[in-house]
Image: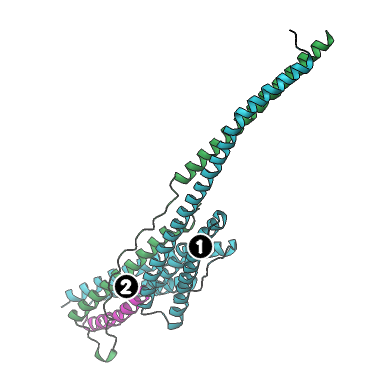
Chain colours: A green, B cyan
Amino acid sequence: MQKNTSGNASTGLLIALVIALVAVGFGAYTLLNQSNKSTDMAVNSPPPTFTPIPMPTDVTQPTSVPNNPASVDTSNTALDQDLQQISTKINAAASASGQVDTSIQNQSADTVTIQ
Amino acid sequence: MKLNIRQKVTTSFLISLLITATVSPAFAQSVTSTTLKNAANQQARIEKLIARGDTEVAKRLADLTAVIAKINALVKLSDSQKNTITVSLQNNIASLTAVKAKIDADTDLVTLRSDVMSILTANRTYLLILPQAHIVAASDRIQDVVDAMSVLTTKLQARITQAQAAGKDITALQANLTDMQTKLSDAQTQSQSALNLVISLVPDAGDKAVLTSNNQAIKTAHSDIKAANADIKAAFTDARSIVASLKAMK
């Protein structure tokens, strides 16, 4: 009777070992499949993108305002012309300032992470 | 019919051998297939990353080339200052061109990732170089306006003096002119300050203290440019008001 009990125990142990082996095999297989799927997802997911805002077009500057004291024209017409030329220059400065704003907004293009 | 212990052990061994023999080939096949899939995924990843790197470099090169043309057209900047900023832009172009060549030749994903990130971290094209160049350009334009308006203030002062000599009340005109001169002086100070803050900045090369001080300098210079722009607009409003008043005086 003792021999039979010992035999049953050994048989049980062996069967348990086989079951464990099979379970480990399938476990590893499942894990590898999951890892593979996640790699596929990583490859197919779109990368983070940042499209810089295009710079506004420059405003053309006029030639400089005459600056010759010997021929200073202070007539109303001359003053109007000066104002006109300065107005164009101010627009050019505003445009340049706008480009500074845009370049500041685009700074984040250098702070993203590309993987 | 009862099996003895040896027979039982043998039977169990044969059963486990049978199970192992059934599962192992499928498992081995699955591992091989997974390895091949992973290799293909890695290659796809490398190709995508190279394409992304090339795109990032191309954007930066286009923007840098455009801003160089702008710097060359500036009128108030000294030759030395123009040279400083142009060299900085050209160095950035050379660095990006070199990193692009390295990226295109990369075959290892880890090295490739590092090289692609260096487009951003080592060059700071968008974080530093382009804002720096645009601030320099804006400062130049503002100083050009200040010069032109300074000439105008001389003319306006002459007309106001004439009007005073003719017995006209010039109190408001003189106040406007004084305000105009104050605004122009401030615009000059602010735009010069912006220029001085950024003209010599260089990429941080991973130094966090330099990164922080660069960012602060760009931020402050940006505020200076805004303030200078507001000043020249206010000065222009004064000028128009003075001219309108002078025209109204007969």
Residue at the (28%, 89%) spot, across then down? A68
Q: Dot 2: few (<14), some (14–19), or many (≥20) neighbours within 10 Å?
A: few
Which of B158/B111 is in front?
B111
Residue at far left of view: B250
Label 1 Cα crowd, 10 Å radius (few <14 / some 14-19 / many 20+) = few
Q: Looking at the rendering, in which quadrant would you find the N terminus of chain B?
A: top right
**Which SS class for mark 1?**
helix
What residue sits 63% from the left and 25% below the top?
Answer: B19
Q: Is tag 2's residue or tag 1's residue first in the polypeptide sequence? A: 1
Q: Reply yes or no: does residue A19 show up in magenta.
A: no
Could you tell me which chain the residue with mark 2 belongs to?
B
Q: Residue furthest bottom?
A: A70
Q: Amino acid at mark 1?
A: Ala
Residue that label 1 marks: B105
The part of the chain drawn in magenta is B140-167
The one nearer the camera, A66 or B217, is B217
Q: Amino acid at mark 2?
A: Ala
Q: In front: mark 2 or mark 1?
A: 1
Instruction: Give the side of residue B182 with respect to residue A5, left or right.
Output: left
On the rendered image, what quadrant is the C terminus of chain B found in?
A: bottom left
Q: Which residue is depicted at the point 52% across and 70% down?
A: B202
Q: Nearer the viewer, residue B150 or A55?
A: A55
Q: Does B84 appear above or below B52?
A: below
Name the subunit of mark 1. B
